[in-house]
Image (cartoon, rainbow, N blue to C red):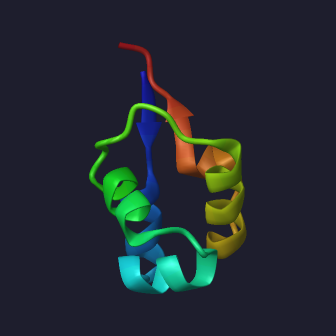
Amino acid sequence: MIKNNLSKIMGEKRINMAELSRISGLNRTTIFQLYHNKTTHVGFDTMDKLCSALNCDVCDLFNYVEG
């Protein structure tokens, strides 16, 4: 299973969805769905924008958990 860490990273950086949307250029709906784990896939362009906006790597955003 792949775990999404977006909400954790946003909390650590004290950034809200509106601010992340502004910085990344991603739609608020996209961020909302990722934040609440309501997505089944994420495009490379979305991952790129999130990593750039949050100054992190893909492995920070997502990790593999056995189970």
Residue shown at the point (39%, 52%) measured from the top left: 34
Q: Position of residue 26 (x, y in %)?
A: 54, 68
Nearest the eye: 66 or 40: 40
Classify the position of the C terminus by image quarter. Answer: top left
Residue 6 visible in image: yes
Q: Residue at x 49, y 77 (%)?
A: 21
Q: Position of residue 33 (x, y in %)?
A: 33, 53
Eyeballing the image, is 33 above or below 27?
above
- In which quadrant is the N terminus drawn? top left
> Which image quadrant for residue 6?
bottom left
> With respect to residue 19, does 43 lie above or below?
above
Residue 29: percent from the left, percent from the top?
35, 63
Q: Nearer the viewer, residue 27 or 16?
A: 27
Between residues 37 and 63, which one lies in front from this camera angle?
Answer: 37
Q: Residue 16: in sight, yes or no?
A: no
Q: With respect to residue 64, does 61 lie above or below?
A: below
The image position of residue 35, as x and y in percent, is 34, 57
* Residue displayed at 62% across by 54% down: 46
Instruction: Decide if residue 25 is on the left or right side of residue 11.
Output: right
Q: Is residue 54 above or below residue 37?
A: below
Q: Residue furthest toward the top?
A: 67
What is the number of callouts on the image?
Answer: 0
- Residue occupying image coordinates x 47% and y 65%: 9
